[in-house]
Image: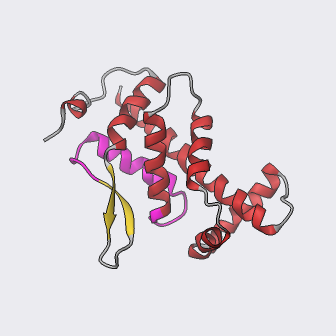
Amino acid sequence: MASIREERWLPRLLCFEPLKDLIQLCSVLSSRFTDEKREDGSFFVSLSGPEDEIREAARTAIRAAHEDELPNDWRYEVCGLAADAMDEASEDDELLEIASTVAESASSVYNSEVLRWYAELPGRLEYAERAREELGASEDVMGDLHHGQWLAACDTALLFLQSLETALEESK
């Protein structure tokens, strides 16, 4: 059964004030990203809740946020962080600013974690190359790798939020 907080979204999202509606949508979504435990004891982020328009919009946004990658735990986690950040945002905040804040939370400060992140999908090295171009070269390779992960997290959060914004526009 949908909570009172969620019922106002069913069956259609009626009003459209872009950032205000996005904040309200993410307020609902924030509670739908849950931590689950695998049989091996590792944790992952999952999208839960009833099969409704909100969940479908979230699925579409999560797919967009994965870009060319197959579904993976890290991207789901960043989408959950983006929903949390948007839930706490004000109407004066910019999406890029929110995505940047999410990237700060999602990026690791530990070299071993950053290297493991790149090892999962070596194609992610393109983010490090892009970071060198857009943010400037770091003093060492690890700095470029850290900046690349930050850039990937920022892109992921921004794509997720922009896709939700599009879903809101289309539902009006």
96 or 171: nearer the viewer: 96
Magenta-drawn stretch contains 66: yes
Vertical relation: 170 (above or below) 20? below
Magenta-drawn stretch contains 12: no
Q: Specify whether residue 155 is in view.
A: no
**Residue 147, how many percent across, how many down?**
72, 57
Residue shown at 43% from the left, 39% from the top: 164
Residue shown at 54% from the left, 57% from the top: 67
Q: Quadrant of the C terminus?
A: top left
Residue shown at 55% from the left, 51% from the top: 156
Number of residue marks? 0
Q: Is residue 80 left or right of residue 135?
A: left
Q: Quadrant of the N terminus?
A: top left
Vertical relation: 166 (above or below) 116? above
Residue most extreme to the bottom: 40
Looking at the rendering, which quadrant does residue 17 occupy? top left
Q: Specify whether residue 148 is in view.
A: yes
Looking at the rendering, which quadrant does residue 114 occupy? bottom right
Vertical relation: 112 (above or below) 54? below
Vertical relation: 52 (above or below) 66? above
**Residue 11, how many percent across, how many down?**
21, 32
Residue shown at 46% from the left, 56% from the top: 77
| Magenta-colored span | 48-73
